[in-house]
Image (cartoon, rainbow, N blue to C red):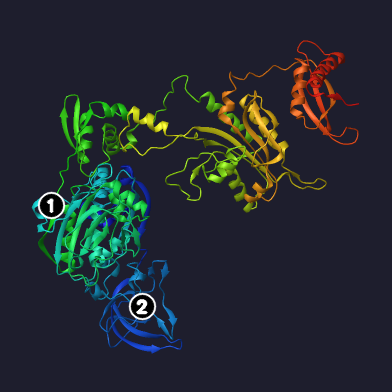
């Protein structure tokens, strides 16, 4: 919210010595965030000048310029003005001007050498078109007062007759500045000068004058034009419009200029001047916080009806767009149909224009949820919707409508009639019980009772003493005050957040990360320490990707489709982490990062076949759902498991002198599996498998104690090509929570033996189709307790090995805890393992 300081001073006492930084500090003290300072960026001399004469001079480029003689005030030694016998004592400047919308005798705005205009654009005397132009006659755009650049700014068009030589910066309000603050969604009342002025008064103790405080008799709208509300399908039981005030002003002159002070304030507040009638409605919206709309009364067809749209109904809004409406949209209609999207934007058929002579003014209170949904549905955020969706003071529409009417009478020459009407609604604000001592206990500051009640009365609340505390009725403009906790926050805010002590809480013993959380952290840290980069991805994907990567066979599986996806092309929640890693890999490769080892730990969504998830019964905001409602909501959520996945592509080591580049392959993926297994404290076995998304024959199934927990393998070349990966890619994915759940008790590090190890190698010939992992398992089982490690070092198929067979070479290491093993003991243990392998797979020791 941009707040011009001159406007702020109208409703709260801000001393002349107060700087914008002081205003920022005061507003920050009551909970706002400082953004930036806005001004016109103009410095003088900028003065009122009068055109004495001009000569039109055609140029070779087809343009005709005017060589003007302009009186800019009394001459003095400091001005350096040339002596002109025809105008003794006057400072006459020769100025080149390309505009033609002025006449001799017109008073204009002249920027003299040394001035700086917005841009910045410094002004200096310079030679142009054969003359030395000693200044510039300015347009409204060049002064920052609007977008129009049809010609220079004539003061007569603004209704200004100032003496020649007067300071034009002060005359046009160009010396004003605006402080810009960030308003949080719960404090919609601060989207107005009224609200910010009240907060400045809270912060400084300055006297506040409420611009909406008027005799209620003055605010009565008269009769003859009462709107009708026909809301047959209110959202969550809230009628779309609870108040609707109309007033009629006749005989307005839309050609009258908007006063420069109003243009300056609107500009500083971030709004363009669009003509006096529209400027007045925007001005009042910024001033009081209640959006107001004006209709050309002569274009209305009958009375006004506020109703919900019918599905498929259309209307053209003020921006010229035809919009297809939803049955949730609230409309302002007359006999011709929709003339406004309530609380968001008016319609084009009844808008005020240069031909408007009679105006119907509308100020209303609309349901915030209805307005918020319509603005988002039509992607049409507006200054009006921004205020309505946060909650507008329900007592302000009468004052806002009268304020607009008064300004149209004053600035547009209209006449306020007795025509109008109002839909009244009783504003009932329930009191909140605030126990004595609650604020002190929650905030941690020893406020006395007078400080508590004083702070609440300062913000406009009615405080009544009751047994054990107070009953507090919040002010009508504070819908965010709903319970004793929000009241306590107000007390702390008004008396200063700096009074709250900084105390580190003492955590109760036994708290901290759960075993599962610690395990997840260990796995992530271990992968990062192993050289992989963690790359979280969005959990959204397509049905095709879910089917391909979410199942071994690529079959179609149930997925969770979002009702309002961020990306319409990826509306499903993921069943696998791999699609996200593929997208990240593609994005990095496209930017030149081609050697990747990345991983993610995240949630996947695994709906069960035949189960319907989700619910239409969404509980209202601000009210804690019942236990039954919470149970139903939890039951509507699909199972969510936390997985870990990794992807490798490119080169492990790049090409170097004397060494070829080495690509990522299955060995690096298997190393990552071992890293995960060590961090989780669970042995993970790899057995031959297959998956639709992986290369046949290069796929492994990951198991813990015979239970499948994931997979590892090389992506199928077609899948890699579809993901725009230029080379080989290897992936792995595990059910991380499932693996950690199998870890059981805390992992205890084994003690190191001080006795030496005995090493043995053995080469076994088995059928080619026998998995090496099964042979390894048989060797391990048969070798007994002395076996410390067992590793496959070679898989040979060729000369010396029978056709259809392969030779597997294993390196075995034996060690005893209490003695040094002999070679005979190691050999005996090895042969025991070979015997088991022979029994199961017909393994023979290769000669």
Q: Which residue is mark 2?
A: 80
Q: Is residue 16 visible?
A: no
Q: Position of residue 665 (x, y in %)?
A: 72, 40
Of the pair 640 and 400, the residue shown nearer to us: 640
How many dots with numbers? 2
Q: Nearer the viewer, mark 1 or mark 2?
A: 1
- Taking 2 as reference, is 221 left or right? left
Query: What is the spatial separation of the Cα atoms under label 1 and label 2, in whole angstroms?
Result: 54 Å
Q: Position of residue 731 (x, y in %)?
A: 65, 39
Q: Are marks 1 and 2 in contact (CB under 8 Å)?
A: no
Residue 356 quadrant: bottom left
Q: Position of residue 48 (x, y in %)?
A: 28, 74
- Taking 811 as reference, is 688 left or right? left
Of the pair 59 and 774, the residue shown nearer to us: 774
Residue 435 quadrant: top left
Say the numbered circle drawn on residue 25: none
Image vertical order of residue 808 relative to residue 596, above or below: above
- Taking 713 as reference, is 103 left or right? left
**Of helix, strand and loop, which one carries label 2?**
loop
Residue 346 quadrant: bottom left
Q: Position of residue 323 (x, y in %)?
A: 34, 59
Q: Residues within 10 Å of mark 2 (few under 14, many from 20)?
A: few
Of the pair 551 and 359, the residue shown nearer to us: 551
Q: Residue at x 16, y 29 (%)?
A: 465
Q: Is residue 57 visible?
A: yes
Q: Which residue is mark 1?
A: 214
Image vertical order of residue 786 relative to residue 306, above or below: above
**Of helix, strand and loop, which one carries label 1?**
loop
N-terminal of the pair, mark 1 or mark 2, is: 2
Q: Residue at x 26, y 57 (%)?
A: 6
* Quadrant the C terminus occupies: top right
């Amino acid at each position: 919210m941009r707040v011009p300081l001159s406007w702020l001073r109208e409703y709260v006492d801000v001393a002349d010595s107060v700087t914008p930084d002081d205003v920022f500090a005061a507003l920050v003290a009551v909970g706002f965030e400082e953004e930036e300072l806005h001004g016109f960026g103009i410095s003088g001399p900028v003065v009122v000048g009068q055109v004495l004469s001009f000569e039109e001079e055609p140029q070779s480029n087809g343009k005709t310029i005017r060589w003007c003689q302009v009186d800019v005030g009394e001459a003095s030694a400091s001005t350096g003005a040339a002596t002109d016998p025809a105008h003794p004592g006057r400072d006459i400047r020769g100025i080149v001007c390309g505009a033609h919308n002025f006449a001799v005798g017109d008073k204009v705005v002249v920027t003299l050498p040394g001035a700086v205009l917005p841009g910045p654009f410094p002004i200096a005397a310079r030679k142009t078109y054969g003359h030395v132009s000693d200044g510039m006659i300015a347009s409204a755009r060049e002064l920052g007062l609007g977008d129009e650049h049809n010609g220079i700014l004539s003061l007569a068009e603004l209704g200004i007759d100032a003496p020649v030589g007067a300071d034009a910066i002060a005359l046009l309000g160009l010396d004003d500045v605006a402080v810009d603050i960030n308003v949080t969604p719960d404090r919609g009342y601060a989207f107005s000068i009224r609200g910010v002025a009240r907060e400045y008064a809270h912060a400084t103790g300055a006297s506040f004058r409420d611009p909406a405080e008027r005799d209620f008799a003055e605010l009565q709208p008269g009769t003859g034009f009462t709107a009708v509300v026909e809301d047959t399908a209110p959202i969550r039981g809230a009628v779309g419009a609870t108040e609707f005030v109309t007033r009629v002003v006749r005989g307005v002159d839309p050609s009258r200029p908007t006063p420069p002070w109003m243009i300056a304030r609107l500009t500083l507040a971030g709004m363009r001047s669009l003509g006096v009638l529209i400027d007045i409605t925007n001005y009042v919206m910024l001033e009081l916080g209640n959006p107001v709309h004006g209709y050309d009364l002569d274009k209305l067809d009958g009375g006004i009806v506020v109703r919900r749209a019918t599905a498929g109904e259309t209307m053209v809004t003020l921006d010229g767009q035809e919009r297809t409406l939803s049955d949730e949209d609230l409309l302002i209609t007359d006999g011709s149909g929709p003339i406004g999207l309530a609380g968001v934007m008016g319609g084009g058929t009844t808008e005020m224009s240069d031909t408007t002579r009679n105006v119907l003014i509308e100020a209303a209170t609309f349901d915030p949820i209805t307005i918020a949904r319509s603005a988002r549905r039509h992607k049409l955020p507006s200054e009006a919707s921004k205020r309505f969706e946060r909650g507008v003071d329900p007592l302000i529409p009468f004052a806002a409508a009268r304020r607009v009417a008064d300004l149209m009478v004053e600035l547009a020459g209209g006449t306020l009639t007795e025509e109008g009407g109002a839909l009244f609604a009783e504003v009932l604000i329930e009191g909140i019980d605030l126990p004595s001592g609650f604020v002190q206990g929650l905030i941690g500051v020893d406020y006395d009772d007078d400080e508590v009640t004083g702070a609440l009365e300062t913000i406009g609340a009615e405080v009544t003493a009751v047994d054990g505390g107070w009953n507090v009725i919040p002010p009508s403009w504070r819908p965010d005050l709903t319970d004793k906790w929000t009241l306590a926050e107000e007390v702390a805010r008004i008396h200063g957040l700096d009074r709250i002590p900084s105390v580190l809480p003492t955590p109760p013993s036994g708290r901290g990360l759960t075993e599962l959380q610690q395990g997840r952290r260990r796995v992530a840290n271990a992968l990062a320490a192993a050289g992989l980069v963690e790359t979280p991805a969005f959990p959204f994907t397509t049905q095709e990707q879910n089917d391909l990567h979410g199942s071994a066979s690529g079959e179609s599986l149930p997925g969770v489709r979002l009702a309002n996806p961020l990306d319409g092309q990826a509306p499903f929640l993921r069943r696998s982490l791999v699609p996200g890693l593929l997208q990240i890999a593609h994005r990095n490769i496209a930017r030149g990062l081609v050697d990747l080892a990345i991983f993610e730990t995240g949630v996947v969504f695994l709906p069960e076949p035949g189960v319907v998830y989700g619910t239409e019964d969404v509980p209202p905001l601000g009210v804690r759902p019942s236990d039954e409602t919470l149970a139903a909501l939890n039951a509507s959520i699909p199972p969510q498991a936390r997985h870990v996945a990794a992807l490798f592509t490119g080169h492990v080591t790049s090409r170097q002198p004397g060494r070829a580049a080495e690509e990522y392959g299955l060995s690096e993926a298997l190393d990552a599996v071992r890293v995960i297994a060590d961090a989780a404290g669970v042995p993970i076995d790899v057995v031959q498998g297959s998956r639709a998304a992986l290369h046949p024959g290069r796929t492994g199934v990951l198991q813990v104690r015979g239970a499948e927990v994931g997979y590892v393998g090389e992506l199928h070349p077609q899948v890699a090509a579809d993901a725009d990966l230029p080379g080989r890619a290897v992936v792995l994915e595990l059910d991380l929570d499932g693996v950690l759940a199998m870890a059981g008790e805390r992992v205890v590090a084994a003690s190191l033996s001080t006795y030496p190890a005995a090493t043995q190698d053995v080469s076994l010939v088995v059928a080619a189709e026998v998995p090496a992992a099964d042979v390894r398992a048989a060797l391990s089982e048969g070798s007994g307790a002395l076996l410390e490690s067992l590793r496959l070092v070679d898989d040979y198929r060729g000369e010396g090995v029978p056709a259809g067979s392969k030779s597997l070479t294993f390196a075995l290491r034996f060690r005893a805890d209490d003695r040094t093993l002999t070679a005979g003991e190691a050999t005996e243990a090895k042969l025991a393992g070979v015997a088991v392998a022979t029994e199961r797979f017909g393994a023979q020791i290769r000669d």
